[in-house]
Amino acid sequence: GAASQLCGLLFEAGTGLDMNEVPYDGTGPAMDDLLGDQVDFMCDQTTNTAERILGGEVKAYAVTTPERIEALPDVPTTEEGGLPDVQVTVWHGLYVPAGTPQEVVDALSAALVVALQNEDVISRLGDLGTAPVSEDRATPDAHREHLEAQIELWRPIIEDAGVTAS
């Protein structure tokens, strides 16, 4: 259940359509099939698709964020399109193996905070339709709390759809 699959499930539920899900091993193959008219649409992260949208290769009908995305100002939100319950925000985390020494975790966390304040990083993330989290959300504890909240948010949707790990 990647975010793109969960987005599709929400879209199907929000529209009442009966859709056939086509599972893919990532954005590349899915985008190839979209561009090749093998599938009608796809849900994916703007970090994966913004350049193709801005380049005119694909049309974005909506973003699933509460507000429009700065990089795609003409693309309405799903709420504006009449689907207020179809909201998916994507986030990324930095992970290390269990048992990694705390001093290594602390050093990585500090380096992440510095990187997320770098103007080039901020600009590039903006080009991809996203933005860095605030410093207080870029800590291991904050990320752990966010991850736990996301699990609880998505659990009923995943269970109702019968999604299982394969």
Image (cartoon, rainbow, N blue to C red):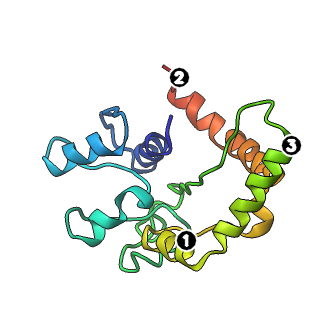
Q: Position of residue 136 (x, y in %)?
A: 80, 66
**Residue 4, placed above or below residue 68:** above
Q: Secondary structure at mark 1?
A: helix
Separation (CA) of disc 3 from disc 2:
31 Å
The tally of labels here is 3
In the displayed structure image, the side of residue 109 where residue 76 appears, left or right? left
Separation (CA) of disc 2 from disc 1:
33 Å
Separation (CA) of disc 1 from disc 3:
26 Å
Q: Quadrant of residue 159?
A: top right
Q: Residue at x 40, y 80 (%)?
A: 73
* 63 and 142: which is toward the camera: 142
In the displayed structure image, the side of residue 86 where residue 20 appears, left or right? left
Q: Check whether the beta carbons of the residues at disc 1 and disc 3 lie within 8 A of each other.
A: no
Q: Please name the amino acid that badge 2 sits on.
A: Ala
Q: Please name the amino acid that badge 1 sits on.
A: Val
Answer yes or no: is residue 60 visible. Answer: no
* 103 and 13: which is toward the camera: 103
Q: Please name the amino acid that badge 3 sits on.
A: Gln
- For disc 2, the neighbor class at 10 Å (few under 14, some 14 to 19, many from 20) is few
* 76 and 27: which is toward the camera: 27
**Residue 124, placed above or below residue 38:** below
Provide the residue designation for mark 1.
121
Provide the residue designation for mark 3.
102
Farthest residue, direction top: 166
Camera-near label (3 vs 2) is: 3
Q: Secondary structure at mark 3?
A: helix
Q: Position of residue 147 (x, y in %)?
A: 71, 45
**Residue 148, disc:** none
- For disc 1, the neighbor class at 10 Å (few under 14, some 14 to 19, many from 20) is some
Q: Residue at x 37, y 73 (%)?
A: 75
Provide the residue designation for mark 2.
165
- For disc 3, the neighbor class at 10 Å (few under 14, some 14 to 19, many from 20) is few
